[in-house]
Image (tube, grey):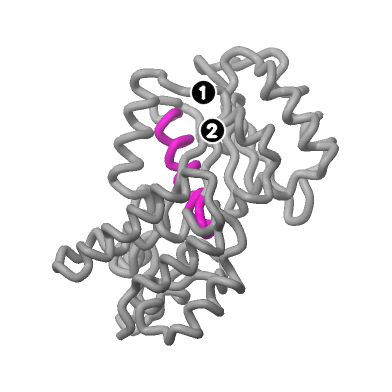
Amino acid sequence: MSAFVTSYLKEVLDTWIAKNHLRNGLLFYGSTSGFPNKVANYFIQAYFSSSTFSLDTNPDFLHIYSEKQIKIDHIRHILDRVRYGPTQHESMIVFIEHLERLTIEASNALLKTLETPPKHVYFLSSSHLFSSLLPTITSRCQPIYCPSLTYDQLFSAVNMTVSEISSTSTYEDLLKLACGVDHPSYCSFHDFLHFSLSKRFAFFHQYIDTKETFTTLLYHWLSELSTDQTYRYLSLSKLLRETLTRLTHHVNLKLQFDSFISQLPIT
């Protein structure tokens, strides 16, 4: 599991756990659903590392997952479980997978819980659709960005768990093995640089529809470039960082797309 989590995130999460610098709500998000889930699971395993219980039998851990919608009954089940607090550990963890699947009714019920969270209970959640979540919920959580791994990182991580991985496997092939998902909007920065100008604009208009998705993609590309320290890629990293800084302000998203694409070299 830890092979899919960047060393920086491991350090941050381990430090938070050791120093108990934790908010009651933690939201793990990224551009691909599998990676936030794996980071959340790393956190859970690290938090309960000294427990004598497995997660399946741990009385202080509750996992909420639904293939379709997370409904009000799921939230009621959570409230029934947490009202008395933890029984075997200092705190209890509730993990809601795919937070974007909450119905409106369930979202409102969860919001009320996050506004006045019970003591000694941590609410963890994951999502790859950050922009679709209610701002009133995200504002009450500590957002934790979970970057996708580079091709080399992902190849190494998958190779640790699955035998006979082909060196010719594409990133999408490895992603399916690692996360069990097919993410059509994924595009590496290396591949993007080889797009024609018209294809670059088409990609952005098809997949990048919010500031959050643009920011997530840029962070992923920065992670990819961190493995290449050539002058060319260092200058491109600077462009990515400058764009990310501008996105923290109230700016026109389309103008940021156009400016970013126009500054990239055509290969």
Q: Is residue 33 visible?
A: no
Residue drawn at (16%, 63%) of the image? 229
Circle 2/circle 1 CB separation < 8 Å: yes
> In the shown orientation, is residue 147 left or right of residue 125?
left
Tell me the quarter of the image containing the C terminus: bottom left
Residue drawn at (47%, 55%) of the image? 216
Q: Nearer the viewer, residue 138 or 160?
A: 138
Residue 3 position within the rendered picture, expressed as x and y whole percent measured from the top left:
34, 53
Residue 82 versus residue 55 in the image, above or below = above
Residue drawn at (51%, 37%) of the image? 143
Label 2, secondary structure: give it: strand
**Mark carried by residue 26:** 2
Q: Main secondary structure of the magenta part?
A: helix
Residue 86 versus residue 63 in the image, above or below = above
Residue at mark 1 = 23
Question: What amino acid type should be assigned to the residue bearing mark 2?
Answer: Leu
What range of the chain is rendered magenta? Answer: 30-47
The image quarter containing residue 67 is: bottom right
